[in-house]
Image: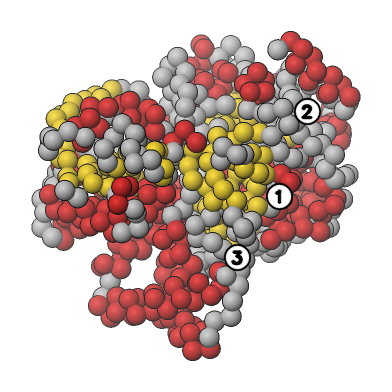
Amino acid sequence: MATEVAGCYQQWEERGLDMGKIEIDLKHVDTSLDLNEFKEDICPDLDLNENNTLPKVMRARVRQWGGEKIWMTHKDFGIWQPYTWKDCYERIELVHLGLVSLGLEPGDVVGIIGDNDPRWFWAEFAVQVGRGIVAGMYTDYHYAEVKYVLGFSKATFAFAKDQEMVDKIVHEKDNLPNLKKCIYWESKGLWFYEQPWLMSYDELEDLGREYKKSHPTLFDENIDKGQPDEPAVIMLSSGTTRMTEDGVPRSQMGQMTHRAVMANLIGIFKLDAWYPTDRWLSYLSPAWGEQYFGLTGGLLSGLEVDFPEEPETINNDIREIGPQALLFPARLWEARIAEVFSRLKDSSRFKRFFYNRFLPLGYKMADYVMTGKKAPLWLSILNKIGYWLVFRPLRDQMGLLHLRHGYNAGATLGPESLRWLHALGIPVKQLYGTTEAGIHCIHPDGDIDYETVGKVLKPEWITVSKEGEILMRGPILGCGYLNDLGAWEKVFDEEGWYHTGDAGHINENGHLIFYDRMKDMVTMPTGRKFSPQYVESRLKFSEFITDCIVLGGEDKAFVSAIVTVDYANAGDWAEKHRVPYTTYPDLSQKSQIYDLVKEEVERVNLYLADDIKIKKFANLHKEFDADDAELTRSGKIRRKFFEERYAELIATIYSDAEKYETEAPVKYRDGRTGKIRTSVTIKTVIE
C-alpha cells in the first residue's frame, strides 16, 4: 500500500499538484482526453483547455453573461427569487474567502447536508475554488451516517441547511475531531445555540467580505491554480453490501476529478442538445447524480437551474417551472405514474372514456417514434387529437408539458412504465453508469429499446466479460476511493478494466441490457437464471405497489415476493370501497388489499416462464425504509440485509403456514427504537 500511495503522490507532483493531504490513483484513468475535441457537443463557445475545471468554466460564463442572464432561481415563501451569473459569482467569492479566512486548505474535505438550494451549489463552488473536495449527504441520514461521512472523510468544514441537519452534526461533534466549523443557511431555531464552532451563512459571507479588503485578487488567483485532474467531488456509492460498526451502510467515497465530471456530459450532449434558454429542475439530491447534471450540465450548457421551495411542494413548483430537462430516479417516475392512475380513477366517466380510447393509439405512436420510423398519416392525426384532449392535460398536471429531455438513473425503470410515459409523449430515457465510473449508456432519440438501459456511448470504454460482468475504463473514471486506495485497486483487473459487479449483455444494436447485480442474479432448481429486479420493476407498474423484493434460488422451490402497498392509493381505494382500517399495518393485511395485489402479481406472471412465476407473496406490515437498512438512500433494495432481517418471514413463505406472527423492531429517524406486533398473511397465487 505504501508503494501505491507513493506512486500516487508522484503522479500529483508530475502534474504540478501540491495537495499532499489526499491520496488519489490516476493510473487507471485516460488523462490524455482533450475536452476540446468534444467542445462542439459540450459547449462550443468555450475553450475547454483553458477552462478545464468547474470554477474556471463558471468564471468564463460570468464574463460572458454577467448580470444579464439568470443562472439560478429558488422559490422562497412562495416567490421565485432569481440570481444572475454575476449574483452567484459574487456570493461564491464571499463564501470562498470566508472559508479561507477560517483555514480552508487545498485537499480539505467539506461536507454538505440539505435540500437542493443555491446555497448548496455556492458552497460547493467555493470549496472547489480552494481546491477542496465536497462530500454531499442525504437529508434523511441519521446521526451515525453523518458521523461516518464526516468522520471517515476527515472533513474540516460542514454546511447544513437548518436546525434538523445541524442537530445531527451537534450530536456527533465529539466524534469529529477534524471538524472546525459548521455553517448553516436557515437560522430558525438556532438563535440560542452557543457552540463556538457553529456560524450562519450570512456570518461566513461577512467574514469573506472583510477578508476581501486585504486580499482583493485571491479569488481569481485560486481559480487559476485549479487543475483538471484534481478531485472535485466525492460521489458516495450505494452501500448495498457492507455495514459500519455503528450498523449503517458503508458507502465507498469515489473521488471524481474535474476532467471526469465534465467528460461525463460528452455522450449526453452529443445526443441531447441543452440550450442556455432551457430550464433544469434541481430536485435529485446533490449527493448523487445532480453533480453531473444540474451542477456540471448547467455550467457547460448555460441553462437556468431552478430549485423548488421544499420537497413537499414539488408538485406545484414543477408546474410553475415547466422544465425542459430533469433527472428522476425510478422510484420517483413510478410515483408520478401512480399519482396519475389514482387521479384517473377519481375523474369523470367522460375523461376516462377518452383516456382509454386514446392510450392504445399513444402506444402505437410511441412505438413508431421510438424506433425512428414514420407513423401512418391516420395515426398521426388521431394521436394529435389525443394529445390535445388527453395527453397534454396529463403532462401539464405532471409538470412535464415542456419537457424535452427526461432521464432515469439508479434502479432501472420498468418497460411498462417507460412505454406508458412515451405513449403520453413524455421523452424519458434510461441512463446507465456507476458512482465510480460515470455514465456510459443512454437512449438516443429514435432508437429507444424499452428492454435496455441505453446505447453504449463509447464502445472502447465499456465491454462485457465472458462471465457476463459489465466492465468499464476510459477518461471518466474516478481517481480512487477516499482514504481507501487498497479497495480501489481490487476493482480493477490487469488490463485496467473496472469491474462494476453488474450483469449485462450488449446486443447486436449496441444497446446494453442490464440484468441485475451479479450477486443478485438468481438460479432456480430447474437451472433457469433470472433477474429479480426485472420482475420487481414490472410489479411496481401498479398504483397499489410502492416497493417489492422478489425471492428465489437453488434452495427455494419456487419464486415468491414481499410487497409494500402504496399507503395513499391503497388507502384511497379502501375508503371508496368502505373497507375500514386504522394504520398502515392494518391496511396492508386487509383481504381486499391482498386481492388487489394478487391481480398485479397475476398480470406480471403472464410475462414469466412457468418455473419463475410468482407462486406466493406477502404484504409487509411496514414500508421499506433506508433508516432500517432495507434500502439505499437512492432507493435501491439492499437484498442481503433485507433477507437477513426478514429470514423468519421468508422461511414462513416457503412453508405450509398461512400466517406469520411478528414483533418487528423499528428504528425511527430521531434514533429511538420500537416494536410493532402484527400478523402477516401469506397469499398463494398458483397452487
**Looking at the image, which is closer to me, 365 or 150?**
365
Q: Residue at x 53, y 86 (%)?
A: 376
Q: Is residue 3 left or right of residue 402?
A: right
Residue picked out by circle 1? 459
Q: Which residue is drawn at 36% across and 63% down?
A: 340
Marks 2 and 3 sit apart, C-alpha to C-alpha, by: 35 Å
| Amino acid of disc 1 | Pro
Q: Count residues near mark 1 (Cα–Cα under 10 Å), then give few for <14, some for 14-19, many for 20+.
A: few
Q: Residue at x 41, y 70 (%)?
A: 394
Q: N-terminal of the two: label 3 or label 1?
A: 3
Q: In the image, is residue 54 above or below residue 343?
A: above
Q: In the image, is residue 115 above or below residue 82?
A: above
Q: Count residues near mark 3 (Cα–Cα under 10 Å), then give few for <14, some for 14-19, many for 20+.
A: some
Q: Is residue 664 left or right of residue 454?
A: left
> What is the x, y in percent for residue 137?
53, 32
| Amino acid of disc 2 | Lys
Q: Is mark 2 on a helix, strand or loop?
A: loop
Q: N-terminal of the two: label 1 or label 2?
A: 2
Report the residue that reaches farthest toward the front. 526
Residue 273 in view here: yes
